[in-house]
Image (cartoon, rainbow, N blue to C red):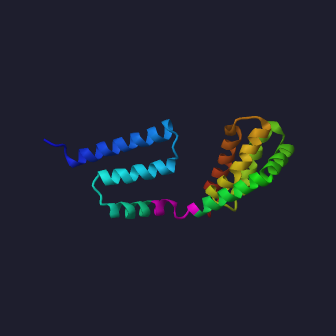
Amino acid sequence: MSPSPGISLLVYAAVAIIALIVLIARYRLNPFIVITLVSVGLALVAGMPASGVVASYEAGVGKTLGHIALVVALGTMLGKMMAESGGAEQVARTLIDRFGERNAHWAMVCIAFLVGLPLFFEVGFVLLVPIAFTVARRVGVSILMVGLPMVAGLSVVHALVPPH
């Protein structure tokens, strides 16, 4: 007696999830590539035709990343340019000079709040990450000590300002 198709699909899904975790956490493979390969493999094992796999993958990724992929890509490039040109270092130095090293977390809340007013959360996050890393390095604290206040400032603006 063979297992029912529903049980087989659940087993395939469980194996796919375990494969994702092992390949990303244990072998440190690129998560995007692992998710792509495992999802395509799962679709093929589940019996989806190859042409349907590609169409389904494109539709899913397009829906998920369509509106934000360009913003994140351009924001990442801008953040990298800011870090490479020394702009992040200058902004971090100014924040630390104004607020003091002991209040670096408050500096990040304030700058995130101000940056978050005209920008969406994702854009502000991508733009402020290089500054957060630079501030944390200059002050000598964990990235969490400046990153979490930054995220909190962006989140508050995102939740309370109407167009967001």
- In-image side of 8 versus 163 (left or right): left
137 versus 85 height, above or below: above
Q: Is residue 19 visible?
A: yes
Residue that appears at 69% across and 62% down: 118
* Picture coordinates of residue 53, whole percent (x, y): 36, 60
**Residue numbers of the magenta segment:** 61-69
**Quadrant of the image containing the N terminus:** top left
68 versus 136 height, above or below: below
- In-image side of 100 versus 45 (left or right): right
* Picture coordinates of residue 46, whole percent (x, y): 29, 52
Front residue of 20 and 7: 20
Residue 64 falls inside the magenta stretch: yes
* Picture coordinates of residue 30, whole percent (x, y): 52, 47
**Quadrant of the image containing the C terminus:** bottom right
Magenta-highlighted stretch: main secondary structure?
helix
Residue that appears at 63% across and 51% down: 155
Q: Quadrant of residue 163?
A: bottom right
Residue 79 falls inside the magenta stretch: no
86 versus 61 height, above or below: above
